[in-house]
Amino acid sequence: MTATIGLILDHEPPGGYSKFPWYALRENYFSCLREKGARCLALFYDTAAIGFYLDTIDALVITGGKFDVNPALYGDKTVHSAITLKDKRTQFEWAMTEEALKRDLPVLGICGGHQLLNVIFGGTLIQHIPDEVESALQHEQPTPRNEGYHKAEVIKGTLLHKIVSASELLVNSAHHQAIKETGKGLIVNAMAPDGVIEGIESTGHKFCLGLQWHPEFFTNPGDHRILEAFVQACKK
């Protein structure tokens, strides 16, 4: 059986590529999964189509993007000046992810998708790492995104550790927010040297991982194993 994996598109206002609003997603989000033997389906924001999408796909990727989860969704009344919102996208991917989790489809949250997963499970976020984490690493790396930048400790006994068979990974880093308190039913599976949470997983689902880095760039051997395991989870 060939797995069909749905990926949530990003959305941009007029400007740049088009004078009208447009959807987009980096090619390697698709190519990395195709390399592991999966088919991919791009998902645009149609809440009426969620049932159809979920009847069609075997797994869901909550992709990243240059925007943030609305702090109101995790009970924070303040909004940091560094935050950018895409409420239409967040509304769709929240509804899509909730229904995917109800069906126990494999779910992979990448970067902003990792953060959204935590909020869906009832967790909270650090709105801007430099303001809240003492002696923080530079989590918005100045080097190209396809290069590893800092190490992440992989926590023993987790699904992630079982998948990558390593206690440490060199990961890329492209975020200014991070998980503060983990949501109910989630455990931490990876941690940066400065204490920033780099990965989470659900203890109540067959495969539900959140990764703060971008495994689609294959910056380390563990990224290959993660995506292979994700595709294989669709067949169980």
Image: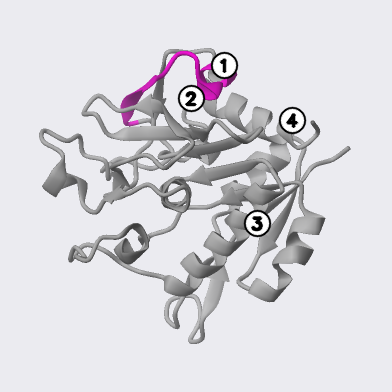
Q: Amino acid at mark 2?
A: Asn
Whichever of labels 1 and 2 marks the residue nearer the N terminus, that label is 1
Picture quarter containing residue 51? Answer: bottom right
Whichever of labels 2 and 3 marks the residue nearer the N terminus, that label is 3
For discs 4 and 3, the disc positioned in front in the rendered view: 3
Distance from Cα at disc 4 to Cα at disc 3: 21 Å
Whichever of labels 4 and 3 marks the residue nearer the N terminus, that label is 3
Given residues 22 and 177, the one toward you in this image is 177
Q: Amino acid at mark 3?
A: Glu
Name the element at disc 2. Answer: loop
Task: Please say if the residues under marks 4 and 3 sit with CB atoms less than 8 Å apart.
Answer: no
Whichever of labels 1 and 3 marks the residue nearer the N terminus, that label is 3
Q: Which residues are magenta?
A: 149-163
For discs 1 and 2, the disc positioned in front in the rendered view: 1
Q: Which residue is mark 1?
A: 162
Please tell me the numbered disc located at residue 232: 4
Q: Does 168 sit above or below residue 199?
A: above
Task: Please say if the residues under marks 2 and 4 sit with CB atoms less than 8 Å apart.
Answer: no
Here the colouring is one colour
Please tell me the numbered disc located at residue 99: 3
Which residue is at a point 51% across and 18% down the rendered structure image?
Answer: 161
Distance from Cα at disc 1 to Cα at disc 4: 14 Å
Residue 172: x and y, percent?
38, 36
Q: How many residues crowd around disc 2 within 10 Å: few (fewer than 14), some, or many (20 or more)?
A: some
Whichever of labels 2 and 4 marks the residue nearer the N terminus, that label is 2
Q: Amino acid at mark 4?
A: Gln
